[in-house]
Image: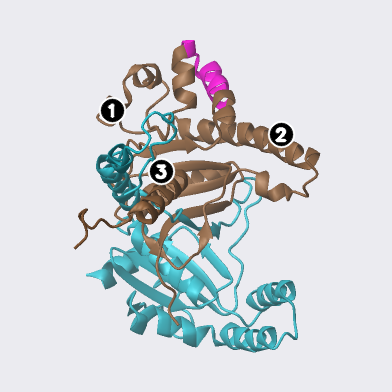
Chain colours: A cyan, B brown
Amino acid sequence: MAEIAEGGGGGHDKGKKRAKKSSTRVDMTPMVDLAFLLLTFFVLTSTFSKPKVMSLVYPAKPDESEKVDAPKINNAITFLVTEDKVFYYEGQYYPVSAPGPEGPTKLVETNFGPSGLRKLLADKNKFVLEGKEGLDKKLKSKEIADTTYTRLLIDFKSKRESLKVLIKTDDKATCKNFIDLVDELKIAEVGVIAPVDILASELELLKQNAK
Amino acid sequence: MPKSTPSIDMTPMVDLAFLLVTFFMLSASFRSNEPVEVDVPSSISDRIIPENIVMVTIDKGGRVFFNMSDPEARRELLQNMSGKYKTALSQKQIDEFVYMSTFGCSMQELPTYLSLESEKRKLFNTVGIPSDSTKNQLKDWIFYGNIAALNTGKTAYEEAKMKGESPEVNDFKPKFILKVDGKAAYVHAQNVISTFRDLHLNNLNFVTSMEAAPL
């Protein structure tokens, strides 16, 4: 324990060694108790991590005056999300009333786990993922700078061959489902993610499949 | 045998204890008193929430709440809103609003809501900010919030410039944050997002808790 030495006091007690022996001690135990109590409190209550955000750019709403048809997109996958379930189809949508060359669109079911979405996306978006691997190597060997890396990666993601994804949800889908899906897309380095409104015929199709 | 009882010198330990107490006291940021609890989904994103924000919260039941980070911007926002909806507010209520956190009530309920004590606000029976297409008050909150946050952001940018720093303009512009409960139906979020898009604000951020990225 810390001690406070009795100082000064004048030279009256010459030779009286007993008085010098008993030093004034301050009992610090309560203070230390309190210090540790506070310490425990702050350690347990403090939160270090600020919340994180995931950014997502939505397509701009088209003006009322100009009615644009949905553009034909190459290499696109459309995900249809309902409560804890996710379906997808590739390419163009063909309703039953106007079937395409291979008949009307059929939905394929997948899941949010690593064996479902992640595997599927890693496979479909091979072009970007392989490109990224090449860039990673170049970055590691310091052939290219950080900023160039970011720029080239964005270039890669917006190329024709890279995967584009449309997300459609029904009224039972939860926000967790949606964010899980977007998260998987970000893991798979998908550059173009467009949440769009679901068509009535797609909704019907989704309902049949979700049963 | 020593005369006095053996005592350990505790000074270094006490020093350390106080050092740690000081550190934790200064570094701790307390969770602000939110009127609604939201359980956000997780993602691999590691971007930290920005400074100047306009935040819309959606709870489990789909109720909509609004929040803004900058107190000065909040003052300007409330002035515009009470002007538009012709809601008379006392100076005390305005001050209360400026230092309040998230709130969710209609413009008509706002004076009553502001007069309540902060503990009672949690129990305030409300349906959230009306955000349906017929009387979309949320749209006005976001619209005026954006203007107010742009103004304060501009001031902050110029101040930083005066100090001789080389600030990035985009860091001072307001960012739009959506804090959605994982269990909320996505249609509720869709409705809010569509309101943002009506105002040509297409770049949105979802609050998520972090999870480890797969290798």
Q: Is residue B36 visible?
A: no
Chain of the residue that carries numbered disc 2 in the rendered image = B
Residue under label 1: B119
Question: Which residue is farthest front?
Answer: A15
The secondary structure type at the circle numbered 1 is: helix
Q: Are marks 3 and 1 in contact (CB under 8 Å)?
A: no
Q: Which residue is mark 2?
A: B155
The image position of residue B215, as x and y in percent, is: 45, 82
Amino acid type assigned to the residue bearing label 2 in the image: Thr
Specify the subunit that label 3 lies on.
B
Callout 1 amino acid? Glu
User: Magenta span covers which residues?
Assistant: B77-91
The residues tagged by marks 2 and 1 sit, at their Cα atoms, a distance apart of 34 Å
Would residue B55 be counted in the magenta stretch?
A: no
Is A71 above or below relative to A117?
above
| Of A94 and A77, the residue lying toward us | A77
Magenta region includes residue B82: yes
Chain that bears disc 1: B
Q: Are marks 3 and 2 on the same chain?
A: yes
Mark sitting on residue B57: 3
Quadrant of the rendering where the C terminus of chain A is positioned: bottom left
Where is residue B122? Give x, y as percent: 28, 31
Closer to the chain start, of discs 3 and 1, is 3
Q: Earlier in the sequence, mark 3 or mark 2?
A: 3
Query: Of label 2 and label 1, which has the lower sequence position?
Result: 1
Depth check, front residue: A37 or A107: A37
Q: Is B159 situated left or right of B105 in this image?
A: right
Element under disc 2: helix
- Per the image, label 3 sits on a secondary structure element best described as strand
Q: Are marks 3 and 1 on the same chain?
A: yes
Q: Are marks 2 and 1 on the same chain?
A: yes
